[in-house]
Image (cartoon, rainbow, N blue to C red):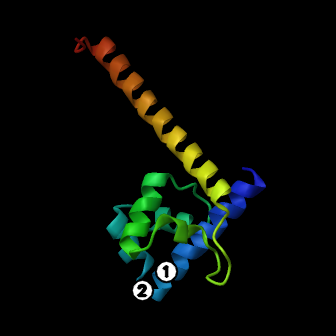
Amino acid sequence: MSKLKSDLNLAVGKSIKDLRVKHEWSQETVAQRLSISIPAFSKIETGVTDVNLSRLEQIAHIFEVDVATLFTEDKNKQPLPVLVYDRMQKKLAESETEIVDLQRKIIRLYEEIHGTGV
């Protein structure tokens, strides 16, 4: 994992934890709202897990903030420069597109193997 990516995961995780603590919610409460396990949520907060755009949007919605807020480690600091944020958003969108394409390929392969395709 690159240093930038690692630092970003840590910053996002810290922001999420700060929001959770501010709301006086447990990890369990947030994990349930996200429909994920507590360990999975803990990995998000500690920066171990890369979080995709749709998950970031879901987290932002739960805390009633915009996604950019999650990229601000310290409320006294400015958010990431727009150029960096735009680049990250583009990479996330590309990754999600790639995942959807792979899912389609898996479905087609399954249909071919089981003779259920059109």
Judging depth in this view, the residue of 20 and 81 nearest the camera is 81
Q: Position of residue 69 (x, y in %)?
A: 53, 71
**Mark 1, secondary structure of its residue:** helix
Residue 76 position by quadrant: bottom right
Q: Position of residue 17 (x, y in %)?
A: 53, 77
Judge whether 99 appears above or below 104 on screen: below
Q: Which residue is mark 1?
A: 19
Is the C terminus in the top left, top right, bottom left or bottom right quadrant? top left
Judge whether 64 appears above or below 108 on screen: below
Could you classify mark 2 by the number of other residues whose Cα lies within 10 Å: few (under 14), some (14-19), or many (20 or more)? Answer: few
Q: Residue at x 47, y 41 (%)?
A: 96
Q: Amino acid at mark 2?
A: His
Residue 3 position by quadrant: bottom right
Judging depth in this view, the residue of 73 and 107 nearest the camera is 73
**Mark 2, secondary structure of its residue:** loop
Q: Residue at x 25, y 11 (%)?
A: 115
Specify whether residue 71 is in view. Answer: yes
Q: Which residue is mark 2?
A: 23
Q: Residue at x 34, y 19 (%)?
A: 108
Q: Position of residue 36 (x, y in %)?
A: 39, 61
Specify whether residue 46 is in view. Answer: no
Q: Amino acid at mark 1?
A: Leu
* Residue 44 as seen in the image, left or right of residue 77: left
Cβ atoms under marks 2 and 1 closer than 8 Å: yes
